[in-house]
Image (cartoon, rainbow, N blue to C red):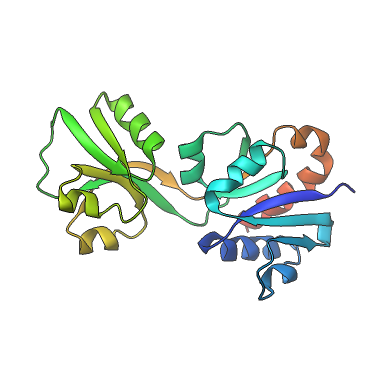
Amino acid sequence: MQKIKIAMTKGRLLGHTIKLLEKAGIDCGPLKEDNRKLVFLLPDYNIEVILLKAADVPTYVEHGVVDIGIAGKDVLLEQEKQLYEVADLKFGKCRFAVAGKPSIKDGKKHLVVATKYPNVAKRYFTEKGQSVEIIRQEGSVELAPIMGLSDVIVDIVETGKTLKENGLIVLEKIADLSARLILNEVSYKTKKKEMAVIIDLIEKAVNI
């Protein structure tokens, strides 16, 4: 049996991923060990797990360093890599939204938009026919409209609590987000049999 390499996102999605794999019948004991390792072998089904930052998972999948990845839809929409997206894993649910002060007026000819997701923002406003200037942010994007850097922001919204505490509201929803199962296009041809077994187990576990 060929080894299947799976890239997983470190942080908040990892716990959900481990629960899903265990529900699928895959022993994830090594992933629960208290250490700083980034590569793990799961003897069941000959799986090698690589832990990565969320933004790096699609890159590893696209380049064939790993066969399968689990990544948030936010990252996939921003990066637009060449890969197969095969399943919605139904955890890590949130949404992309446009947010700003309640006082912002509709119909402004040109908007300044602050965001960590410039490609998502540009695509959304281009489709609407709205003229925008995109300002990329890395920190607390909520500060931008408060301090006058931007008119609005495009960001991930889970509960809306952070927006509310900073005097902002959701103005428009862009897209629903959740964790997705992604595949390398070449691997799916060369390791189809082994990958199909794992994909089937995961998809059944999602729907239990």
Query: Picture quarter containing residue 150?
Result: top left
> Image check: 55 left or right of 105?
right
With respect to residue 149, does 134 lie above or below? above
Q: How many marks?
A: 0
Check the picture and name the quadrant holding the C terminus.
bottom right
Q: Is residue 80 left or right of residue 1?
A: left
Position in image of residue 24 (x %, y %): 71, 60
- From this viewpoint, is residue 87 visible? no
Residue at 20 percent of width and 60 percent of height:
166
Q: Is residue 118 left or right of residue 189?
A: left
Look at 21% across and 37% down and name the residue there.
Answer: 112
Q: Position of residue 158 (x, y in %)?
A: 37, 57
Which quadrant holds residue 107? top left
Residue at 49 percent across and 57 percent down: it is 92
As drawn, the residue found furthest toward the right would be 1
Query: What residue is shown at x 54% (from left), y 52% (from top)?
Result: 54
Q: Residue furthest top?
A: 129
Determine if residue 163 is in view. yes
* Percent x, y of residue 197: 79, 48
Q: Position of residue 194 (x, y in %)?
A: 82, 45
